[in-house]
Image: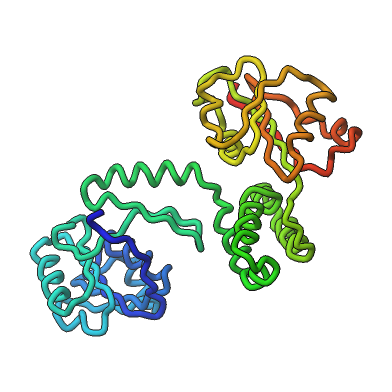
């Protein structure tokens, strides 16, 4: 590992951006999101940067690079289109032991800005160390598509209740089980469904009761016509969370291989009420049970589930790609 990854707290701290074009504007915007006090120096500025300056969001320093600009800065970003200017910025900043990033020039930089997947307060940073920026970008795009956009709200809920969680679950093993429940159980499911109030209520109910054992969860997943590529992202997520995988005829080994390594995998030929009861039995103890069916999958008969007295479990259907 050539570069040491870290996250910098820039809230209320001065950062200098040298450059007034579109790249400098993007860097300044990201720094503003992190709460930095941003100064931007250049002979000319984009209309957006000018507007930010007039609104007091950034401080504009107009003119050619002046070494005095770096005074008071915690970080320096060089984002001009002239390498000689960028090199001078890097030299001046380096002489004062300031961290400096020269955009798209790792040789002149003492730190690099990674590709970011932002699910604030959860943030994932990806870097190739300057070796292959395109690969880092491709990985970021893949992770953007795989990670739920509700993760940030889930993390914010957990942070808001951090003291209550530690009080209710004082042992580390208890808290680990709780956070597994938080990520895999009804709170996350309600957030994915857009029901923040229900998510908050489910979290509060768990904190009030302190019950370590959540209700079981059953997910009916359509496995598509055969190859793993036919799985939806929801189906893949369910397999990653599964404690038990039940599968019917026509489900390929390739699809089953995507399940959690420690998940129990069981073939089933049952149908109707017998199938619902079998799935419910496997869900005892708060386990997540996934039923894989070839094609579009099995429709969830909620009326029948209620008639059988199994509605205390969490039921979800994820159709496959047909």
Of residues 321 and 238, the one drawn nearer to the viewer in this rendering:
238
Of residues 249 and 92, the one drawn nearer to the viewer in this rendering:
249
Relative vertical location of residue 60 with respect to residue 307 in this rendering, above or below? below
Seen in the image, is 28 located left or right of residue 148?
Answer: left
Seen in the image, is 99 located left or right of residue 206?
Answer: left
Relative vertical location of residue 71 with respect to residue 102 in this rendering, above or below? below
Relative vertical location of residue 315 with respect to residue 34 in this rendering, above or below? above
Q: Residue 122 at what x, y percent from top left?
A: 49, 59
Rendered-image quadrant of the N terminus? bottom left
Q: Residue 170 at what x, y percent from top left?
A: 65, 68
Residue 55, visible in the rendered structure: no
Q: Residue 213 at what x, y percent from top left?
A: 74, 52
Residue 124, visible in the rendered structure: yes
User: As drawn, which residue projects farthest toward the top?
Assistant: 250
Tell me how the rendering is colored. Answer: rainbow
Rendered-image quadrant of the C terminus? top right
Relative vertical location of residue 40 with respect to residue 133 in this rendering, above or below? below
Of residues 196 and 271, the one drawn nearer to the viewer in this rendering:
271
Seen in the image, is 63 located left or right of residue 171?
Answer: left
Q: Residue at x 24, y 68 (%)?
A: 77
User: As drawn, which residue projects farthest toward the left?
Assistant: 84
Q: Residue 198 at what x, y percent from top left?
A: 75, 56
Number of labelled discs?
A: 0
Q: Residue at x 57, y 17 (%)?
A: 225
């Amino acid at each position: 590992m050539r570069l040491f990854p870290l996250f910098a707290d820039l809230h209320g701290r001065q950062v200098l951006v040298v450059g007034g074009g579109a790249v400098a504007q993007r860097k300044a915007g990201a720094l503003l999101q992190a709460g930095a006090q941003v100064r931007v120096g250049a002979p000319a500025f984009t209309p957006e940067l000018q507007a930010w300056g007039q609104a007091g969001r950034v401080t504009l320093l107009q003119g050619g690079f002046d070494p005095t600009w770096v005074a008071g800065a915690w970080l320096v970003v060089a984002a001009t289109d002239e390498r000689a200017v960028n090199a001078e910025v890097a030299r001046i900043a380096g002489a004062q032991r300031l961290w400096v990033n020269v955009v798209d020039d790792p040789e002149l930089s003492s730190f690099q800005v990674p590709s970011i997947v932002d699910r604030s307060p959860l943030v994932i940073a990806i870097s190739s160390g300057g070796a292959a920026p395109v690969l880092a970008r491709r990985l970021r795009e893949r992770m953007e598509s795989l990670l739920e956009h509700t993760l940030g709200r889930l993390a914010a809920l957990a942070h808001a209740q951090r003291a209550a969680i530690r009080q209710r679950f004082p042992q580390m093993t208890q808290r680990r089980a709780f956070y597994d429940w938080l990520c895999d159980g009804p709170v996350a499911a309600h957030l994915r469904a857009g029901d923040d109030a229900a998510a908050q209520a489910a979290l509060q109910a768990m904190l009030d009761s302190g019950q370590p054992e959540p209700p079981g969860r059953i997910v009916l997943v359509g496995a598509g016509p055969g190859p793993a590529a036919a799985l939806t992202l929801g189906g893949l997520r369910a397999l990653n969370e599964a404690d038990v995988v039940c599968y019917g005829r026509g489900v390929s080994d390739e699809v089953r291989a995507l399940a959690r390594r420690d998940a129990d995998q069981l073939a089933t030929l049952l149908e109707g009420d017998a199938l619902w009861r079998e799935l419910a039995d496997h869900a005892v103890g708060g386990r997540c049970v996934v039923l894989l069916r070839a094609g579009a999958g099995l429709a969830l008969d909620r009326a029948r589930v209620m008639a059988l007295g199994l509605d205390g479990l969490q039921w979800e259907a994820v159709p496959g790609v047909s």
